[in-house]
Image (cartoon, rainbow, N blue to C red):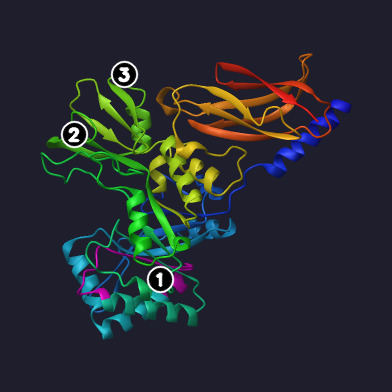
Amino acid sequence: MKKMILFFLFAFALLSNSFAQNKKLVIGYYNWDNSAYPHSAIDFSNLTHLCHAFIWPAADGYLDASEIALYPSLISTAHSNGVKVLVSIGGYGTAAQTKGFKDMVNSATARAAFIKNLVDFIKTNNYDGADFDLEYPGSSERANFATLLIDVRAAFKANNIPLLSAAVPSSDWNGGYDVAKIKDVLDWIGIMTYDFTGPWDPVGTTAYHNSALYTAGKQDYSIDNSVSSWYDKGMPKSKICIGMPFYGYLINASDILSGITSTSGEKSLSYNTIASSYLNNSDWEYKFDNSTKNPYLRNKAHTQIITFDDTTSTRLKCEYVNNKALAGTIIWKIAQSYNGKTNPLLETVGKYLLKSVVSVEANDNIIPAEYSLTNFPNPFNPSTTITYSIPLQKQSALVNVKISIYDMLGRNLGMLLDQEQSAGVHKVVFNANGLPSGIYLCKLEAGSHVELHKLIFSK
């Protein structure tokens, strides 16, 4: 009984000192996924918002909803789980659709008609707001696009519609966003920090990572650069969401960041397809670029690569959001990680952005090459921080990690941690209040790996 009481004492101390994250925004895009990823399969605890895509404005302000699959059950189920749903406007459409969008933006009469039609559509279909995805406004739309967003916010306020956001490019390369005017009317911007490479890139250009976290070497584009670009333009960090892709690209190149050799057969692949058909395929080798913090696959012939995100890189991006005090993330699109039973990438995002976790990231997101187990201070009184390293697992799979405390008689005093984790450097706090001075053993179990470390508690 005494040991049990002591265990609860330091377990309580652990929890009181453990890392707990502020809840972030997790905004998942959803379109035409009713059958492949129905509302009943979605774990809404991993989301704060959904963006239902897409409707299109015409040049005269008419609202074309022919390309959206209205899904009342999705909206009602999301609402019952505390998740808000926005309707997304625009997207990557045809030249005619984009022209119609821009023509509406530049006409005061069309803007007024569009806003009325949008408010009616939102109220009729029980949405919570609108997400604008004009790809992309230029200098000729800059002033009027800001006016449109300001007027939409006013109309929303008059009609008790709470949310207004915008999906924006990785940088304002086209000069289409008046940040000073729109930052106060938008709840967030979702930076589309993906598609840094793709089948559209011509032969001879660099095969970039699809969504690199950091710029390094020949990787000219990155999430970190994009965040800095929008922040420097005046967008508050509290309104910046980074983009996370649940897909990748098969590219003809000998290696990542080498030249593209052909565009024949290049294609987009969902994470589920990559995980089920390529990760466990002996013809493909898993690699991790520790400079950009991204995985990729390379075939044995060294003629093709697949650039994508897995649970490790997704976790690192979540840690980046937390460390930079950003608003959260947008995801294109949540169905692409669903395997019929689970959604590994969405679960990773939910875990690290919405739910408290015991472990914390350290050492600037270094991916270690081997296991390690240390603590500091040692000797300690009354608490010490246990630091442990988990290297990349086979195919970057999660590994079950257990950390337990033993006395010198081999008696298990309790378990500090028992959860699945991905590669990284993690920490957990052990508080020995209530225990006698002496030597204790910390045991790390990670898959088949077992390691012991001596802790010295000195009052």
Q: Which element is circle 2 on? A: loop
Determine if residue 422 is in view.
no
Q: Which element is circle 1 on? A: loop
The three-letter amino acid code for the residue at tag 1 is Lys
The three-letter amino acid code for the residue at tag 2 is Ser
Instruction: Kindly identify which residue carries mark 1.
Output: 183
In the rendered view of the protein, which quadrant contains the N terminus? top right
Instruction: Kindly identify which residue carries mark 3.
Output: 282
Instruction: Kindly identify which residue carries mark 2.
Output: 258
Image quadrant in which you'd find residue 338: top left
Q: Earlier in the sequence, mark 1 or mark 3?
A: 1
Identified at 45% across, 77% down, the residue is 156
Query: Tag 1: Cα neighbours inside 10 Å, few (<14), some, or many (≥20)?
Result: some
Identified at 85% across, 32% down, the residue is 5
The three-letter amino acid code for the residue at tag 3 is Ser
Whether 420 is among the magenta residues is no
Q: In the rendered picture of this protein, how many numbered marks are placed on residues?
A: 3
In the rendered view of the protein, which quadrant contains the C terminus? top right
Q: Is residue 185 above or below residue 435?
A: below
Q: Is residue 204 above or below residue 126?
A: above
Q: Earlier in the sequence, mark 1 or mark 2?
A: 1
Q: Position of residue 368 (x, y in %)?
A: 45, 27
Whether 132 is among the magenta residues is yes
Q: Position of residue 139 (x, y in %)?
A: 21, 72
Q: Magenta span covers which residues?
A: 120-142
Disc 1 and disc 3: Cα gap in Å? 49 Å
Identified at 32% across, 76% down, the residue is 146
Q: Residue furthest bottom?
A: 109
Q: In the image, is 51 to the left or to the right of 170?
A: right
Q: Position of residue 455 (x, y in %)?
A: 70, 23
